[in-house]
Image (spheres, rainbow, N blue to C red):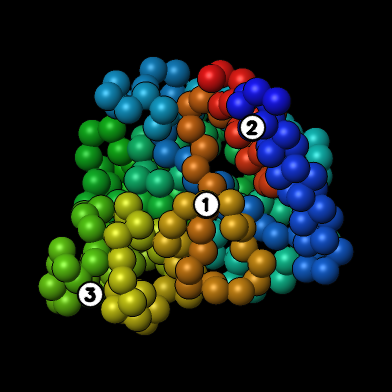
């Protein structure tokens, strides 16, 4: 047996295991809520040095159409605090940083398909060129389709090795105050920038926020660890087929990616 076929056989075994685990999870633990993480949505990448950060509007529309067609409910990030994952299928759509295209491109699509989304806003960039204005934030919040939550003031690393205690408190408290003043709505969810945090940072964040997002992977939210939720990053190279596979069976999606890499060798 060639080395390539050995890899293929191993991947097939992983596939079967993933299918079994998926069925067992559904039977014993119910469905998990997957939290998807987007950034910019525009035809031309917002950052030419990192084009994958910008999902094409046409691709996002296909994804929203998929959720709508499957009867998958979209929920705000902050709603996870009172949600008990079970048989109802739902996802949380989140958009980091607060790019202005979240208003010009994403908001119209949310209205078209009746989907909810959460924008994690860097409050120091409100009213800055290329980012959301206070008026845009208010309009989206008032629609009932968008919740604007905290992504700190500066988007700088939060771990106490990078910042002193008082700076971390400021990042938490000031971003919350600024957003609540703009939206008139509670700000009780936080997305920690760049996954930079430690236990002390989580303790501080917990004083201000009920729901905290810390990293990225396929773990999903199963009703536990409400202050340590991981999200699935969605980028320019993802298709609606990827979204379907990730939503229906994360294990199958991961094995498929392994098989694709093996075939390319």
- Name the spot of residue 175 as percent of width and height, x first: 29, 63
Q: Secondary structure at mark 1?
A: loop
**Split into 4 quadrants, where in the image is the N terminus?**
top right
Nearest-to-viewer mark from 2 and 1: 2
Q: Which mark is residue 217?
A: 1
According to the picture, the residue beneath numbered tag 2 turns out to be 7
What is the C-alpha distance between the residues marked 2 and 1?
24 Å
Q: Secondary structure at mark 2?
A: helix
- Between disc 2 and disc 3, the foreground one is 2
SS state under label 3: helix
Relative to 176, 233 lies left or right: right
Residue corresponding to mark 3: 169
The crowd level at tag 2 (other Cα within 10 Å; few <14, some 14-19, many 20+) is some
Q: CA distance from mark 3 to mark 1?
A: 27 Å
Mark sitting earlier along the chain (2/3): 2
Please tell me which of labels 3 and 1 falls first in the chain.
3
**Residue for point 82% across, 61% down:** 24
> Can residue 201 be seen here?
yes
Give residue 22's position: percent from left, percent from top: 78, 54
Q: Is residue 253 above or below residue 143?
A: above
């Amino acid at each position: 047996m060639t080395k390539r076929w050995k890899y293929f056989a191993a991947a097939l075994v992983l596939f079967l295991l993933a299918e079994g685990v998926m069925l067992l999870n559904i039977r014993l633990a119910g469905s998990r809520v997957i939290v998807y993480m987007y950034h910019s949505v525009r035809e031309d990448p917002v950052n030419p040095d990192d084009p994958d950060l910008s999902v094409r509007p046409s691709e996002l529309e296909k994804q929203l159409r998929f959720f709508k067609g499957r009867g998958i409910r979209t929920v705000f990030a902050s709603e996870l605090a009172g949600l008990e994952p079970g048989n109802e299928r739902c996802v949380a759509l989140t958009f980091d940083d607060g790019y202005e295209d979240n208003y010009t491109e994403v908001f119209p699509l949310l209205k078209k398909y009746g989907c909810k989304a959460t924008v994690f806003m860097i409050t120091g960039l409100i009213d800055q060129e290329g980012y959301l204005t206070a008026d845009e934030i208010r309009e989206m919040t008032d629609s009932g389709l968008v919740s604007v939550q905290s992504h700190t003031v500066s988007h700088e690393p939060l771990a106490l090795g990078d910042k002193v205690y008082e700076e971390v408190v400021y990042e938490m408290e000031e971003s919350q105050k600024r957003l609540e003043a703009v939206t008139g709505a509670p700000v009780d969810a936080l997305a920690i920038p760049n996954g930079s945090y430690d236990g002390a940072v989580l303790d501080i964040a917990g004083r201000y926020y009920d729901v905290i997002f810390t990293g990225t992977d396929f773990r999903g939210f199963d009703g536990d660890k409400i202050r340590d939720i991981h999200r699935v990053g969605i980028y320019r190279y993802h298709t609606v087929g990827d979204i379907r596979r990730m939503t229906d069976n994360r294990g199958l999606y991961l094995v498929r990616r392994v098989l694709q890499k093996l075939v390319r060798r």
